[in-house]
Amino acid sequence: MITVTAEEQFQAWKAKELPAAEEVRPGVWSIPVPFINNPMRYTLAYLLIGDGEAALVDPGWDSDVGWEMLKAGLAIAGLTPASITAIVVTHFHPDHLGMAARLREASGAWVALGADEPLPTHWRVDPTQFVEEDRAQFIAWGVPAQYLEEVSFQADTWAQMTGVAEPQRRLADGELLPVAGLSVRVLATPGHTPGHICLIDERNSLILTGDHVLPRITPHVSLEAASHANPLGDYLDSLEIMGAGAEMEVLPAHEYRFRGLLARAAELKEHTLERSREVIAVLESGAAASVWDVSKELTWSRGFDSLRGFTLRLALAETASHLVYLTEQGRNVGISVSRGTPATPNLLPTLSH
């Protein structure tokens, strides 16, 4: 369906190694940053060098090892952290935003997110209420008592999320990055998160897709952010606008570069709709009365019984998103899907099934 355009990067991915930093186009660099203790292994940060200014897109998971690798990648490009003037984050997940605070401290650069991405102020509530309401959502979803502790957020999670600094800028759909010497346009692609953005570099015929379109993995689309009414519907709509980068080389935030964006978007759409058809089949069997009941009957790569902790939470939230999507399509699913609390953001890594 796609054509790999970065053979060394692809071979490193197959060997489960970190790829090397490399120049994709003059002034455009790919720099891997380790994603600690996660099967994704790394986030691909992208350095865009302008005229006396430079933007870094998705600086990655915050760790000392990652910081050293980011500095080493910048050095290969002839820069230091102090050279960065803009930090652009495709979405509010820690494997993309995590290093932003450290990089901002070292550079003074502004940090930007998409215009519609939730901010920490949206979920700053009493931590006790936050934990209780999050737990109540999973009870309403039919999660058995023995699994509630591992799927629901705890007070330390609340502290982690509200401790993240707010960005200095918001980027609207169609806006050009305010970085001298660049001509990179923002494309709003909600779905994976409410305010996910892609970036189109028409001058270099490149599209940076964040987690919206990856070459192999299906991005996780879940019912997490309370402000996100129909995540799956938004995701499918956002796949439809990928024609903007149809002929461009795709620079994803994980795995490896490729061409064939429209074919991959079509494949992702069909995969997503097939999942909804599987949900419908479970509902029509009459054996499911809750989100939990539906989820345990679906096909998961290593089986439902292997899902634990946050992975189980992700699976349940994904199932809930399909139920909401089907309801919005006019189907009577017969299952009430409660929406937790505004204190529950979509702050979780990608999951494929």
Image: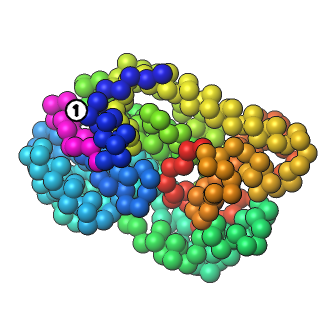
Q: Residue furthest bottom?
A: 128
Tell me the element at label 1.
strand
**Numbered label tally:** 1
Residue 132, compared with residue 241, is above or below; it is below
Closer to us: 32 or 179: 32
Identified by mark 1, the residue type is Val
Residue 25, compared with residue 15, is above or below; it is above
- Across and down, in percent, residue 83 comes to 13, 52
Q: Residue at x 49, y 26 (%)?
A: 264
Residue 56 appears in the picture as rendered: yes
Closer to us: 233 or 214: 214
Which residue was labeled with disc 1? 24
Q: Residue furthest top?
A: 247
- Across and down, in percent, residue 106 comes to 18, 64
Q: Residue at x 30, y 65 (%)?
A: 63
Residue 348, compared with residue 185, is above or below; it is below
Q: Residue at x 51, y 77 (%)?
A: 156
- Across and down, in percent, residue 250 comes to 36, 30
Closer to us: 353 or 52: 353
Instruction: Answer with left or right where residue 249 lies relative to residue 78.
Output: right
Q: Residue furthest left?
A: 78
Which range of residues does the magenta coloring cover? 18-30
Callout 1 environment at 10 Å: few (<14), some (14 to 19), or many (20+)? Answer: some
